[in-house]
Image (cartoon, rainbow, N blue to C red):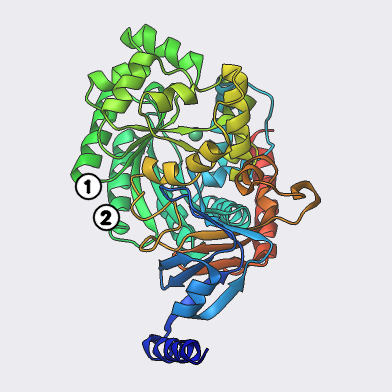
Amino acid sequence: MLLRTWVCLLAAASAGFAQPARRTVSLVVTGGIVVTIDAAGRVLSPGAVAIDGRDIVAVDTPEAIAARFSGRESIDATGQIVMPGLINTHTHAPMVLYRGLADDLALMDWLQKYIFPAEAKTVTPEFVRAGTRLAALEMIQSGTTTYADMYYFEEEIAKVTKEAGLRGVLGQTIIQFPVADARTPAEGLARAEAFIKQFAGDDLIVAAVAPHAMYTLDTATLTAARTLADRTRAPVLIHLAETADEIKTSQEKHKTSPAQYLESIGFWGPRTLAAHGVWLTPADLSILARRHVAVSHNPESNMKLASGAAKVVAMRQAGVVVGLGTDGAASNNDLDMFEAMRQAAFLAKLQTTDPRAVPAPTALQMATIDGARALGMDKELGSLEAGKRADVITVSMTAARQTPMFDPLSHLVYTTHGDDVRTTIVNGRVLMRDRKVITLNEAAVLDEARALAERVRAAVR
Ligand SMILES: [Zn+2]
């Protein structure tokens, strides 16, 4: 008895001496179910995340984090899931201003009769800034922390993205016909190069080259876009094999598929992300796998425009990395990545008649770590692990539709909406807390968008 008391006293004393001083960090998120999306698929229930500056410094149990760290700020995530921010691998942010302008049309009709004419009359730097503010507000509110974009005046999109605090892989669009920010593709290429130089080394913005598609560009411009990307080490974003029309055009003009035509001209290279890939053949997939070209799957846009069902299971089996995207809000009609996850799972099941196709954990991976891989940023993003950037969201799990909860991963994919996100953190900075967006004036952003809608309406009258 006496001996045991001695041992206890000794243990207590040595624990007291050995206790290192707690490290002060900028932020501790504690108390929620932490879904890490790390390689082991660790889920800590409850767990905590310590953040210092722009980085995650530790992910552990609340007790272990409290023993090692004291946060200057803390967020109580009780009743919530804490997870990596979502990565939208394909959108056109300012197109939120064309949301609901023209629905229920095939891609070519929709583009040629509504979107291209509206863009010709409305796209200005001011319009692009207002659209990006609205898109950023929606993304922050629905838990997207990184997005890949292809549009015009991309430097304006980059400035607003930085102000909002979001992370972006932003591609200056190059297209054959005259557009708002370039009369010729050569001008578009020059703009892309200036944009890449302007944002070199930026903490939040990765500037990319975005040749629109093989059916809207000639061979010389496509190869010039690749050369520019190689010279500047910038990522490349392109649309690929989106519709049956594109395949037909490619067969008529080049006697081969879009992916094989692009292979034949030496277009494929590192850090390249092809959006859609609905009509890729097994031969196309082996080219993309060999060239390490990733695909952005956009199930909602593909369904709404009736473009077809991308063969996601076959892509993944062929070794192609598949991220998830919303596409522009004019063909979705929102930027909610929770809905994109759910529809990706449902569409794969319908397409294969196999309910095991794209299970919840796979959909979740596609929206996080595989999105990061698709953008060549998986060392920094896509999971909650020490050393990665602190892009973190908390998601409430207390709504009627989320009750009861047996499996957090199932709930994230099958019942959760973007509106359930409570906190959005990018690069260690809190952009939204308890659904209050801190970096944007919500009322002003909405007013500005409503005022610009008049200009859009007049453009297609
Ligand atoms: Zn697109």
Q: Which is nearer the N-term, disc 2 or disc 1?
A: 2
Whole-Å distance between the Cαs marked 2 and 1? 8 Å
Q: Position of residue 347 (x, y in %)?
A: 60, 26
User: Three-letter amino acid code at disc 1?
Assistant: Thr
| Residue to which mark 1 is pinned | 232
Where residue 95 sits, quadrant-wise, is top right
| Residue to which mark 2 is pinned | 197
Q: Position of residue 37 (x, y in %)?
A: 47, 49
Q: Is residue 253 left or right of residue 349?
A: left
Total of numbered circles in the picture?
A: 2
Circle 1 crowding by C-alpha within 10 Å: few under 14, some 14–19, many from 20: some
Q: Residue at x 49, y 21 (%)?
A: 311
Compared with residue 454, is residue 14 higher up or lower down, i.e. above or below?
A: below
Q: Position of residue 230 (x, y in %)?
A: 21, 40
Q: Is residue 301 left or right of residue 49?
A: right
Compared with residue 38, is residue 426 higher up or lower down, i.e. above or below?
A: below
Identify the element where label 2 is drawn: helix
Q: Are marks 2 and 1 in contact (CB under 8 Å)?
A: yes
Q: Which mark is residue 255?
A: none
- Whether residue 5 is visible, yes or no, is yes
